[in-house]
Amino acid sequence: LFAAVELAPRDPILGLNEQFAADTHPAKVNLGVGVYFDDAGKLPLLACVKAAEAAMTEAAKPRGYLPIDGIAAYDKAVQGLVFGADSAVLKAGRVATVQAIGGTGGLKVGADFLKKLNPTAKVLISDPSWENHRALFTNAGFEVGTYAYYDADNRGVKFDALLADLDAAAAGTVVVLHACCHNPTGYDITPTQWDQVIATVKAKGLVPFLDMAYQGFGDGIAEDGAVVQQFLANGVDSFFVATSFSKSFSLYGERVGALSVVCADADEQKRVLSQLKIAIRTNYSNPPTHGAQMVATVLDTPALRAQWEEELAGMRVRIKQMRTLLVEKLAAAGVKTDFSFITRQRGMFSYSGLSKAQMERLRAEFGVYGVDSGRICVAALNSKNIDHVVAAIAAVV
Ligand code: LMR
């Protein structure tokens, strides 16, 4: 039966973890996968999460099935965070939100729903995008193309080309947009540029699918979510938002995410929700309890929420410090390339501009792991490993 099965290549991001674990380099550093580590190099367990979990253990409950669309309080908390608790669109009952297995689960539920809705639609992702976007939408049955994004020469976004590509897309094309902290480049577009994107999306009848996996890692929770408000303010009446709490709650392994679909009215919302539930039921039946319950508890308990916002700000600030330190130390090490662009990038990642060959040398000779595309996770740098990383980069440039 399996004689003709081919060995698949390892995952470009998660596959690096396996290679890293097997590496015996004494000073190895994992800047591959997008995971935040604290300055001691430890994966944080947020105090707000610990407190929510303790309260849940104290009042331990039996584990029945959740509703297909998840914990109602969780879905409501997600809506408050993404759209603003007083949002008119929520009051009008226009948003269908379902709990999902991580942000990836939210994307997949949305992709399955969209495929049924419009089987011939194409999907456009940014060039480059998160490695899994293409694979996920391809596996959901879509033809996936790209719109221009990264400008290697000017270290930024090729905005005119981006807009031209969106302008040339056929009506109904699904456009996957990074709400903030673009993965992998770290370059975001400005609010004014978002207005232009939104105008094009509206004029051309495109279907926006926002991936918001890093809310709070750029400039703040509200700042990073502002694009959602821009879509609403500009009267885009149907769009998708995938949410992930992997990073912002440091709950990677709990797979806590959501999908929200903004609809034209409350009647549409009911029908859309019913279809999202079919996508969930036929993929994994219904979601797990633990992680979403913790997030809902934190978001709904004012003291824990305040604590979360503070802890998230702490992560955001530390990443920015690492960006500045990296640039300073590279210059101090005599590296001629101007790396100051790293401080203009947002979120966990830096598209370093290093080539695949240079990334391979970083791994082989220094045990410094980044993605072949040149993406490094700045959120995994700390005051102890940064000198080794700097020495390694200085050696390969
Ligand atoms: C990443 O881009 O490294 C993260 O989003 C983790 C993943 O699942 O790829």
Image (cartoon, rainbow, N blue to C red):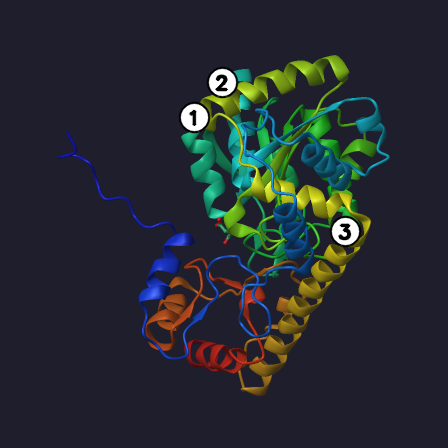
Task: Name the spot of residue 353 as percent of width and height, x first.
Answer: 51, 64
Q: Residues within 10 Å of mark 1 (few under 14, many from 20)?
A: some
Assign the N terminus to one quadrant of the image.
top left
In depth, the one of 251 and 104 nearer the eye is 251
Figure quadrant of the C terminus: bottom left
**SS class of the residue under badge 3?**
helix
Say whether residue 397 is left or right of residue 291. Answer: left
**Mark 3 highlights which residue?**
305
318 to the left or right of 372: right
The residue pinned by badge 1 equals 141
Quadrant of the rendered image containing residue 233: top right
Residue 374 in picture, x, y percent from top left: 47, 62
Q: Residue at x 64, y 27 (%)?
A: 206
Question: Do tag 2 and tag 3 residues touch (Cβ < 8 Å)?
Answer: no
Above or below: residue 241 compared with residue 52? above
Looking at marks 1 and 2 on the same chain, the residue that comes earlier in the sequence is marked by 2
**How far is mark 1 from mark 3, CA to CA?**
39 Å
In this view, the mark in front (1 or 3): 3
Q: Which labelled disc corresponds to residue 150?
A: none
Indicate the amino acid at tag 1: Gly
- Residue corresponding to mark 2: 119
Amino acid of disc 2: Pro
Q: Which amino acid type is marked by label 3?
A: Arg
